[in-house]
Amino acid sequence: MTDKPLIIVEDLAKTFVLHNAESATIPVFQDLTLQVAAGECVVLAGESGVGKSTLMRSIFGNYLPTQGAVKVWHDGAYVDITQANPHEVLEVRRRTLGYVSQFLRVIPRVPTLQLVMEPLLENGVPFEEARDRAAELLSALRLPQAHWDLPPATFSGGEQQRVNIARSFIRKYPVLLLDEPTASLDAENRAIVVRLIKEALAEGAAMIGIFHDLDVRDAVASRLFEVSQFKAAA
Amino acid sequence: MNAIPGRIAPAPLLSVEGLTKWYGHVLGCRDVAFDLRPGEVLGIVGESGSGKTTLLNCISGKLTPTSGEVRFDTRRFGLTDIYGLSEPDRRRMQREEWGFVHQNPRDGLRMRVSGGANVAEPLMNLGARHYGEMRQSTIDWLDRVELDTRRIDDKPRNFSGGMQQRIQVARNLIHGPRLVFMDEPTGGLDVSVQARLLDLLRELVRDLGLAVIIVTHDMAVARLMADRLMVMKGGEVVETGLTDQVLDDPQHPYTQLLVSSVLQI
Ligand SMILES: Nc1ncnc2c1ncn2[C@@H]1O[C@H](COP(=O)(O)OP(=O)(O)O)[C@@H](O)[C@H]1O
Ligand SMILES: Nc1ncnc2c1ncn2[C@@H]1O[C@H](COP(=O)(O)OP(=O)(O)O)[C@@H](O)[C@H]1O
Ligand SMILES: [Mg+2]
Ligand SMILES: [Mg+2]
C-alpha cells in the first residue's frame, strides 16, 4: 500500500457543448481539486444537477473533462485518465478503477453467475476460483440461489442492483466510484452493502460515493465534498 | 494463442495509416489511421454511405486503397504491409489468420455446398484431413451458434437469413483466426440470437485474445461489444475514443446527433 493519494483531481473543469441545440453550453464545474487517500470514502454532496455524477464519470474516463487532470494510482505510478489512450484506460479499469452505477448493462441472456464471474475471468482468474468467489458474493448479497442461472433481465430493480454491485466488488478494486449503488435497496440489503464498503475501505480502497440515503452516507463517509464550491460561471 | 488474458499486449496486431479510397471522383474513405491490439474490439459506426464498408474492405485486403498502408503482424513475416505481399501470400494469410463476416450471408457462403461443408471448409483449406475430427468440430461450432446440428447436410438456401448468418459466423471462427472483420453481422438476426453471438464473441476475445473490427449501426451492439469506437461521416473519421465515452459524452456534432437519435442505449 502507498501513502500517496490514490486519486488526485487537479483543476478539473467540465462544460458540455450541445452542438445541435444552437451550441448551448452547460458549464458544470471549474478549478475543481480533490484528493482521496487509501481507506478514505469521500461522499459527494449537493443538490440534484450540481454535477456529482459528472465529476464521477470524468474520473472514470466516461466523460471528457474540458480542462485539468485526473490522476489514478495504478501499478505504482499515476495515470492521467484524461490523457491516457483508450487501451490504457481499459487496463486501469480492469485492475484498479471500478465504477458502480445504478443501472445494470450487460449482454442479454447471460446467466447471473456468469456475469458476476466475468470480471475475474477477464483478469485471468481460473474458472473454479471465479465461480466460487461469485457464489460467495451473491450469497453475501442474499440473491436467492434460484436466480443464479437466470439472466437478470427479469429481476426486480433491487436484485439487478445487487448483481451490479457483485460484478464490481468481486474485483476488489483499489479505487472505487459508487453512484447511488443502493438506490433501490431495502434497509437490510443496504446494510449488507455498507458492510462490503467498509471491508473494502479497511483493506485500503479509496472511494468516492454518491448516496442519497443518509444512513448509508453516515455509515461510510470519511468526509463530505460539496461540488457546488466549484460551480462554473454560466 | 499467446495473449495474456485480461491484458492487452503493447505491440499492435494491425496498424493502419493514411488509408484513402477514391472511386473515381467519389470518396470512399479518407486518411484513416489507427492501431489495433490482440484482444481489442474496434467498432465502426456512422450513417449509410459514410464509408464503413469501403474502409473495412480496404483494411481486410479485399479492396486496394488509393493510398495509405495496412500493416498486419503476420505469423510468417511479422508486421507487414499486406498490399506489399504477393497475391498468394496475402490470400494464404487471409485464410489462416483472418475471418470476414459479410453483411449479406450469401456473399460469404458457398451456396451449392451444405451448411456443414461451409463451416468445415476453412479447416480443410488449412490442411485438416481427419474427417471425423472435422465433423466433430463442425458440430461443435453449429452448436455454439445455436443451429440445429441435425441440419448439417442442408444447403444454405434451405436456411432462413438469420440461420445463414450463423453459418457464416461459424465458418469464420472455426479455424481460430486472430482477427475477424464483421460488416453489420447482427442486422438480420433475432435479438436472442444476436445476444448469443455477442456473448460468444466476447468469450473468444477474452479467452483467446481475438481482435475484432465490427461495423454496426446498432449503438447497443456497439456499447456491449466494442472497446473503442470510430465514428464516420462522409468518408472521414469524425470522432474516436473509448466506446462509453463516445456514446455518453460525444464531442462532434454528428456523433451527438447519432447518439441522441436512438431510443435507449
Ligand atoms: N452527457 C451529458 N450531456 C449533456 N449534459 C449533461 C450530461 N450529463 C450531465 N449533464 C448536465 O450536467 C449537469 C450536472 O449533472 P449531473 O452530474 O448528473 O448532476 P448530479 O449527479 O449532481 O445530479 C446537469 O445540468 C446535466 O443536465
Ligand atoms: N464500388 C463502388 N463504386 C463507386 N462508388 C462506391 C462504390 N462502393 C461504395 N461507393 C461509394 O462510396 C461511399 C461510401 O460507401 P460505403 O463504403 O458502402 O458506405 P457504408 O458502408 O458506410 O454505407 C458512398 O458514397 C458510396 O456510394
Ligand atoms: Mg447523479
Ligand atoms: Mg456498408
Image (cartoon, rainbow, N blue to C red):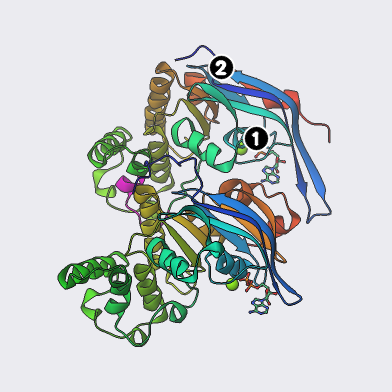
Residue placed furthest toward the top: A3
In the depicted view, which residue is nearer to us: B235 or B22?
B22
The chain letter under disc 1 is A
- Image-quarter location of ligand 1: top right
Q: Which residue is the site of mark 1?
A: A83
In this picture, residue B140 sits left or right of residue B81: left
The quarter of the image holding the C terminus of chain B is bottom right
Give whichever of discs 2 and 1 has the lower sequence position: 2
Q: Is residue B217 visible?
A: no
The chain letter under disc 2 is A
Q: Amino acid at mark 2?
A: Pro
Q: Which stretch is magenta?
A: A107-115
Q: Is residue A116 visible?
A: yes
- Percent across and percent down for residue B34 are 60, 52
- Percent across and percent down for residue B27 are 72, 71
Instruction: Note whether ligand 1 is within 8 Å of mark 1.
Output: no
Q: Which residue is the site of mark 2?
A: A5
Q: Secondary structure at mark 1?
A: loop
Label at residue A15: none
Residue at position x 36%, y 76% in the image: B163
